[in-house]
Image (cartoon, rainbow, N blue to C red):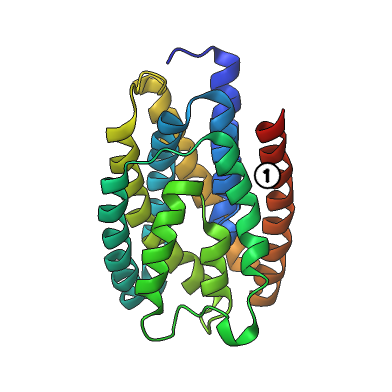
């Protein structure tokens, strides 16, 4: 994929900005980044590129906050994700763009309708495995499921640093599996950027994630959870409308 300087600069800026956003809230940035990538390329290569960028960002975020990772949760999530990955490989389904946008936007609103008794909590027994099992399927169908993952974590007793660190570690697993899944389903990965641009995008994701660390340290737990909810619902509403436009246009 050969892009001009302007397009490369725009993409680098989007990666940096969304990495800052995800670095602060542990989500939302991925939803924006995937939406932009889907405007530029087909679903399978967009998913692969998204997975590679997010793998670098989440891997670096995990390292920065490694002392706050709850590894018990990561292990359970990984086990569930591997089971779902195996099942999805048997189906080998690639969704179209309209479905991805609608699912991306609808998931937070649907999750918010759950009664308090059914509210997900990542600290509950068996919850990490079930979270990985269900979210890996949604990761491969909708692309970014930070809104649902956010519900599991924000309703737990974990503080903001533990939430961001542990979510990042679980998403390293998810993005490795995403790249493996769509990398084998893509008819061609020629739409991926050239090697030099991939390197620039990886660097931008690291820089954005690093810049976000200072913001997160100054933020309160209450502010973190409040702004997380506002951001995710604003982005979700836009994606539902865009998905419906793609479906009926």
Q: Is residue 178 above or below residue 81?
A: above
Q: Nearer the viewer, residue 23 or 170?
A: 170
* Mark count: 1
x 64%, y 85%: residue? 116
Q: Position of residue 171 (x, y in %)?
A: 40, 57
Asked if residue 33 can be seen in this view, the reply is no
x 56%, y 56%: residue? 27
Q: Nearer the viewer, residue 85 or 222?
A: 85
Q: Is residue 58 above or below residue 66?
A: above
Determine whether, in the image, residue 231 is placed left or right of residue 156. Answer: right
Q: Nearer the viewer, residue 237 or 175?
A: 237
Question: Dot 1: within a 10 Å radius of its alpha carbon, few (fewer than 14), some, or many (20 or more) residues?
Answer: many
x 55%, y 31%: residue? 38
Q: Position of residue 212 (x, y in %)?
A: 57, 54
Q: Is residue 1 above or below residue 25?
A: above
Q: Quadrant of the N terminus?
A: top left
Asked if residue 145 can be seen in this view, the reply is yes
Determine whether, in the image, residue 218 is placed left or right of residue 209. Answer: right
Q: Quadrant of the C terminus?
A: top right
Q: Position of residue 58 (x, y in %)?
A: 42, 53
Which residue in the structure is indicated by mark 1? 239
Q: Secondary structure at mark 1?
A: helix
Q: Position of residue 132 (x, y in %)?
A: 38, 65
């Amino acid at each position: 994929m050969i892009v001009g300087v302007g397009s490369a600069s725009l993409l680098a800026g989007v990666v940096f900005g969304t990495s800052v956003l995800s670095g602060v809230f542990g989500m939302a940035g991925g939803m924006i980044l995937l939406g932009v990538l889907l405007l530029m390329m087909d679903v399978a290569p967009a998913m692969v590129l998204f997975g590679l960028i997010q793998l670098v960002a989440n891997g670096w975020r995990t390292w920065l906050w490694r002392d706050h990772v709850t590894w018990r949760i990561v292990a359970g999530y990984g086990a569930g994700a591997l089971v779902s990955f195996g099942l999805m490989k048997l189906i080998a389904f690639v969704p179209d763009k309209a479905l991805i946008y609608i699912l991306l936007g609808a998931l937070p609103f649907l999750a918010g309708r759950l009664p308090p008794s059914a509210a997900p909590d990542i600290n509950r027994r068996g919850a990490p495995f079930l979270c990985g099992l269900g979210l890996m399927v949604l990761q491969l169908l909708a692309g970014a499921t930070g809104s649902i993952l956010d519900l599991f974590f924000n309703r737990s007793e974990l503080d903001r640093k533990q939430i961001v660190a542990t979510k990042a570690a679980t998403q390293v697993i998810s993005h490795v599996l995403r790249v493996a899944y769509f990398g084998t389903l893509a008819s061609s990965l020629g739409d991926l950027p050239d090697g030099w641009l991939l390197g620039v995008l990886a660097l931008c994701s690291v820089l954005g994630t690093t810049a976000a660390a200072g913001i997160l340290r100054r933020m309160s737990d209450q502010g973190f959870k409040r702004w997380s909810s506002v951001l995710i619902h604003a982005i979700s509403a836009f994606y539902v409308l865009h998905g419906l436009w793609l479906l009926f246009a």
